[in-house]
Image (spheres, rainbow, N blue to C red):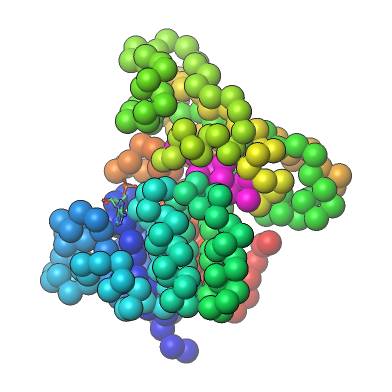
Amino acid sequence: MKKIKIGLVGCGAIGSSLAKEIAFKMKESAVLSGLYDIRPQMSQALSRQLTKSEKLRVNSLEALIARADLVIEASSARAAWEITRKSLAAGRMVMAMSVGGLAGHLKELSLLAKRSGARLYLPSGAVTGIDALKAANIAGVKSIILTTRKHPDAFKGVAYVEKKFKLAGLKKDKVLFNGSALQAVKYFPQNINVAAVLGLAGIGLAKTRVRIIASPFTRKNIHEILIESKAAKIFTRTENIVHPRNPKTSYLAVLSAIAALKQIFQPVKIGT
Ligand SMILES: NC(=O)c1ccc[n+]([C@@H]2O[C@H](COP(=O)([O-])OP(=O)(O)OC[C@H]3O[C@@H](n4cnc5c(N)ncnc54)[C@H](O)[C@@H]3O)[C@@H](O)[C@H]2O)c1
């Protein structure tokens, strides 16, 4: 079988973990064909780590797309739409991690993919239950509530939080947000991709409820999901170990992307 050429946009916590996995553990099915980061030193350093040279680093998104069959977006919510749109338009498969940045564009993206014959993959990320939600949604889902708890450090640099709250020295849980997934992805673009995935897999972002809590009692990213549907009542709780390079990102999100990639390569697909 021909190996799939994978180009990676964003060489931070998720991107660098994925690049290592692809380069060293997916040799049979895939080859890393390019690395692009808006900060060239990031793609340069990663290329050196992987190949002892700069041969994987490219200078533009267009150059990356030209080298790839599949583009992985692991950059930022702000950039996700442009990267995904351009890659799909060029007929490339895309796996996007910054799902919050795509939330308002799913119809256009699906049209683009249909037209070019490409495919867009959005991994489940750091939550449990997307498989059951997709199945339950066929019969009808009444409500979805996501409650996310993270250590106050995970909200550093989030403009919405820094404007409204003082989290330094927090002694008890503080509810930072209670609203729709649509608003959550707007105010917490780096923290709450899970809300976007849930919304897209279920009853839409406007109807999906989200509570975000800063908790000084945990160093984990904890997501609880309560789904009421005609087929089942579903409750899941995922206690995520944070990524060592980025406390906003959960380790499971990286593994979820690896598992999603494996689904593309493997002839047997397990799970919905
Ligand atoms: N789907 C999920 O479950 C999930 C989970 C965690 C994080 N994420 C999202 O994945 C993305 C990456 O997360 P991370 O932890 O690796 O972040 P990170 O900050 O560690 O790395 C992001 C990298 O992307 C680069 N970048 C930013 N804008 C770019 C652009 N326009 N073009 C090229 N490169 C660009 C940055 O320079 C940086 O090196 C974020 O948007 C994050 O919100 C998704």
Report the number of numbered marks: 0
- Compared with 132, 265 (above or below) is below
- Compared with 17, 66 (above or below) is below
Residue 133 appears at what percent x and percent y?
A: 71, 49
Read off the magenta span.
191-200
Q: Is residue 82 magenta?
A: no
Q: Is residue 119 left or right of residue 140?
A: left
Q: Nearer the viewer, residue 90 or 149?
A: 90
Q: Quadrant of the C terminus?
A: bottom right
Residue 252 appears at what percent x and percent y?
A: 47, 48
Residue 95 appears at what percent x and percent y?
A: 47, 63
Q: Is residue 114 visible?
A: yes
Q: Is residue 199 magenta?
A: yes
Q: Residue at x 55, y 34 (%)?
A: 183
Residue 247 appears at what percent x and percent y?
A: 36, 37
Q: Residue at x 31, y 71 (%)?
A: 62
Q: Is residue 221 left or right of residue 156?
A: right
**Residue 122 image-quadrant placement:** bottom right
Q: Mostly what secondary structure, the magenta segment?
A: helix
Q: Is residue 17 visible?
A: no
Q: Residue at x 39, y 48 (%)?
A: 78
Q: Nearer the viewer, residue 81 or 22?
A: 81
